[in-house]
Amino acid sequence: MAGRFDPLTRTASRGGRVDVPAPARGPGQSGGKERVWVPDGPLDLGLTLGPLRRGPGDPTFRVAPDGAVWKTARTPAGPATLRITGTGSGTGTGGATATAWGPGADWALDTLPALLGAADDPSAFVARHRLVHASHRRRPGLRLTRTGLVLESLIPTVLEQKVTSDEAYRAWRRLVRQYGEPAPGAAVPEGLYVMPSARTWALIPSWDWHKAGVDAKRSATIVRAARVAARLEEAAAMDLPAAAHRLEAVPGIGPWTSAETLQRSNGAADAVTTGDLHLPGIVGYALAGDRDADDAAMLELLAPYAGQRHRAARLILLAGHTPPRRAPRMYRSDIGTI
């Protein structure tokens, strides 16, 4: 599910929401290329871009006190830094102003509308449950982002396989800071990085994977994906079934990983996450009072939202209606200390 759910705090952080302050008035950023985009409806930057942040310390994503969202990307044209501000409040109906730096600046600005949900069609969604309807009504600015970049979402998703969010976020931070490069541009926040290239991911030695707390299975999956990165990036232009098939052809990438990736890279409104530890129980509890629901039961409950099942699941998570805890917390480990 785009944006992780934190079973320790019982929050809806997994719904993919980040808090974006109202934009402060002040001088613009110098030295970069600029574009203004106005959507045809409400735009909430925190909801739309939130799923792209991998934890509060993500070195590729930053929300500044002045209301600007900073994001880096390794585009087909090279590294880019993007600074996005809303023309109104963070949840307003205005548009967005973006400034970009680096070799990939033009590509980043060209794809800005897609990043902010231009390819998404919120009007296609019809709520079929009271809770979903209420969550949808409270969040008119929710749009599904489409980055157009597969590896950018795939690698951190693989790092999240069968570990706690904290473990995955820690590994992502360490590897990006060690093997990535400082974000290009003027007045870029300190500590902002562009993720490593596919070749660099493929050449990370085993001991550095170990220090980052990444086991051999996950690191091998990332290396295999990096070696066929060009083929995987083609999935960003495919329909959902073909894109999922392309990703899942790589050993170690299954339906959970492909769905989590394509929700972000393709803006796939119907890419519902299966094989998740928490999601079936959350959906089952929210829609039918069944905290023990499995994937089959979850898919049956989401069937009325065919074509929009990912959006429905996000709205359920954002509603924060989760079952009470009755199981022990997931064990946290760090193989990097062994």
Image (cartoon, helix red, strand yellow):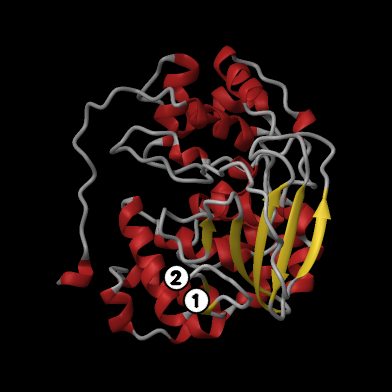
x and y percent of residue 81 in the render?
A: 64, 70
Q: Amino acid at mark 1?
A: Arg
x and y percent of residue 76 in the render?
A: 71, 76
Residue under circle 1?
224
Residue under circle 2?
221
Query: Is 282 left or right of 70, judged from the image as shown?
Result: left
The residue at the far top in this view is 130
Q: In this view of the protein, can residue 294 be seen by the observer? A: no
Query: Is 319 left or right of 26, judged from the image as shown?
Result: left
Residue at left offset 59%, top offset 26%: 302
The residue at the far left in this view is 338
Q: Are marks 2 and 1 in contact (CB under 8 Å)?
A: yes
Crowding near the residue tagged with mark 1, few <14, some 14–19, many ≥20 C-alpha atoms within 10 Å: some
Q: Nearer the viewer, residue 212 or 235?
A: 212
Task: Look at the numbered disc 1 and give the secondary structure of its residue.
Answer: helix
Query: Is 149 left or right of 118, judged from the image as shown?
Result: left
Q: CA distance from mark 2 to mark 1?
A: 5 Å
Dividing the picture into quadrants, the one containing residue 320 is top left
x and y percent of residue 26 in the render?
A: 67, 55
Q: Nearer the viewer, residue 98 or 76?
A: 98
Task: Look at the numbered disc 2 and give the secondary structure of its residue.
Answer: helix
82 over 40 or under it: above or below: below
Q: In this view of the protein, can residue 257 be seen by the observer? A: yes
Residue at left offset 66%, top offset 27%: 305
50 over 58 or under it: above or below: above
Q: Quadrant of the C terminus?
A: bottom left
Q: Amino acid at mark 2?
A: Thr
